[in-house]
Amino acid sequence: MEELSKSQRARLAIRTFKTMADALILRGYYKPSGKSGEKFSESLKLFNPEIYGTMSDARIVELKGLEYVMDRMPRGIEKCNRIILTADEDFHDTSFEKVTPLKRRRQSYIVSEKEICFVISHGLTEIYDILAHITFLNIEAQKIYGQICNKDGGTCSEWNDLQKAANQQHLLEGAELDQAIWNLSIIVGRTYRETRDSYEYLELHHNKKENSNNGLFSIIYSMGQKVIEEIESRDDLLTIYFTPSLQEMIGHHKYASLWAENVKHHLYDRGLQDRPLHVVSANMHSMKNIFYGAGYLKISGRNVPEDLYDMISEVRDFDREIDLYAADFGFSSLVDTTESTIDVMVIDTAKNTPFNLHESIQCDFSYLEKEQPVILVIDYAFGTQAFDILDELLCPCLLDEKTVTFNIVSINVMGKAGTLPGKKGDIMLATAHVMEGTTNNYIVDNDLDINDFDEGYPIHVGPMVTVLGTSLQNRDVLNKFHTSNWKAVGLEMEGGHFQRAISAAIIQGHISRTVKTRYAYYASDNPLLSGQTLASGSMGVEGIAPTYMITRVLLEKIVNPLPPAVCEL
């Protein structure tokens, strides 16, 4: 039998992970320590996602990966042995505590000290993401158990010391803290400095914020203790359940349909249903700041910096104030109430004035007066959720007992992505979306060009890989996409799903074939470079230039007439 390459084995493992996840959802439950759970864990280990670092090394606990997961999972997840994934349970009138992870917009409820329930409103990608994180935590817990057990069947002295540190009521300091971290470093197989860095990270980002996770001592102790309890009693085995309501929801756009209905009502109530509509998938600050920021600074008596990016630094702390100011110039917002967690902003460009725009922005106000385009900014979707919301948004709807079809002129996606040939802060323009784990590929007629951006700025043009999730990325697979005939320049999670919805809407006649599509991504990480993966932290101020450069280009495409067509002989 011909031996498979690393990338082939990893792609097989990714496919196995997805297939098993889909099968387990239909089955209704699984136990990570059971046969199906072990096979599931094996597939995750085999393709060894970059975000989980040294997960496959049985000698050491992966602390950076643990930080990443704890940022995106609810408080107390490390203690739970019953985890339920459901679709539409109504917990609003119960005593269950709602908890929201620090860096992921997902809803979960603490049912008891050892039971937690996730309400899935973002589709399959959210399920894959949660299952990958739970599997990672279980793998690391098994490592901890292997380290703390001695030959006599008991636990080591370091474990007893960790128990005291985890249950300590007062804050550890000085020599007492140093000793506790040293004992913990022995258990996790890491250096004192590595262990202290993770301890300080969790103290800074979690313990001091409401609803965030426990400290490192408590997390490691709970993970190890859970395995001990599982071995002592089969009744305590970690079990993940998928409710019938979740099984029925998959493939149906319940939350997306409610979200799109609210958005269309918001536009209709403002009399914008017949106006040219430009849909922009982006964050909830850049388009607003770039369109109204200069005007706000002027009326506030502040200087407007000549450099656009310097101006953005000046307005970043005045989000609420700019909202109130912009309301007089065609701005409105719609906070999501459907559990889709996708907020919306509407900008009626015809009501803005030159006073509000930064001098570096090219805008034809006579064109705005004549055409009166409307910009609909929608917050970032999560993976497959992008298809659900755009598919629903592009459909005609019934308002006041009449069918309304919105005049969609362009669909613009400003995404955050991983780069393959570049580094953090670079920009990527998509020529196609290649769907990981399937044979689906979509050509993109991208209405963006390198010449639209600042001269000399690093920009990469080529196909983008749409991955199953942030945690499901493998270095060998990504390198193969980059170096093979695919020549992929980056990886992201939503673009392929957006393109799928656009193609479906054109086929169904909901939008015109002439709709402009624009895809630009800024690099938040490079999964092929150590120290530049998502686990290395956020971009901070270095993200201002690429974010607002893309925003400026998209805005100028919308607020200026199309250039005359050139006939090429």
Image (cartoon, helix red, strand yellow):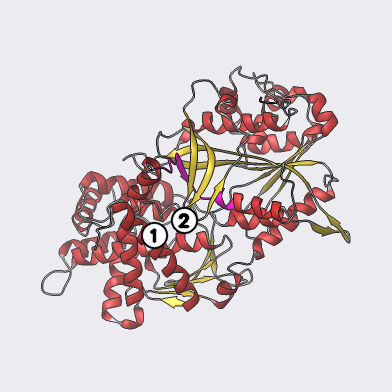
Q: Position of residue 361 (x, y in %)?
A: 67, 23
Which amino acid, by three-letter code, is at mark 2? Leu
Q: Name the quadrant containing residue 323.
A: top right
Query: Which mark, residue 14?
Result: 1
Q: Where is residue 567 in the image (x, y as percent from the top left)?
A: 70, 26
Residue in the foreground of this view, choosing between 135 and 250: 250
Query: Residue at the location (43% across, 35% down)?
Result: 424
Q: Where is residue 350 in the image (x, y as percent from the top left)?
A: 81, 32
Query: Which mark, residue 546?
Result: none
Which amino acid, by three-letter code, is at mark 1? Ile
User: Which comes sooner in the sequence, label 2 or label 1?
Assistant: 1
Magenta span contains residue 489 = yes
- Locate residue 153 relative to residue 256 in the image: left or right: left
The image quadrant where one finds the N terminus is bottom left
Residue in the foreground of this view, choosing between 429 and 345: 429
Q: Distance between the residues labelled 2 and 1?
A: 9 Å
Q: Name the quadrant containing residue 139.
A: bottom left
Q: As displayed, is residue 250 above or below residue 209?
A: below
Check the image and name the residue furthest to the right. 401
Check the image and name the residue furthest to the top. 306
Magenta span contains residue 291 = no
Check the image and name the residue furthest to the left. 151
Residue in the foreground of this view, choosing between 203 and 20: 20
Q: Are the two marked residues, 2 and 1, in contact with CB atoms closer than 8 angstroms?
A: yes
Query: Residue at the location (34% across, 53% down)?
Result: 52
Q: Where is residue 194 in the image (x, y as percent from the top left)?
A: 25, 46
Magenta part of the chain: 485-497
Q: Residues within 10 Å of mark 1 (few under 14, many from 20)?
A: many
| Residue underneath mark 2 | 468
- Dot 2 falls on a residue whose secondary structure is loop
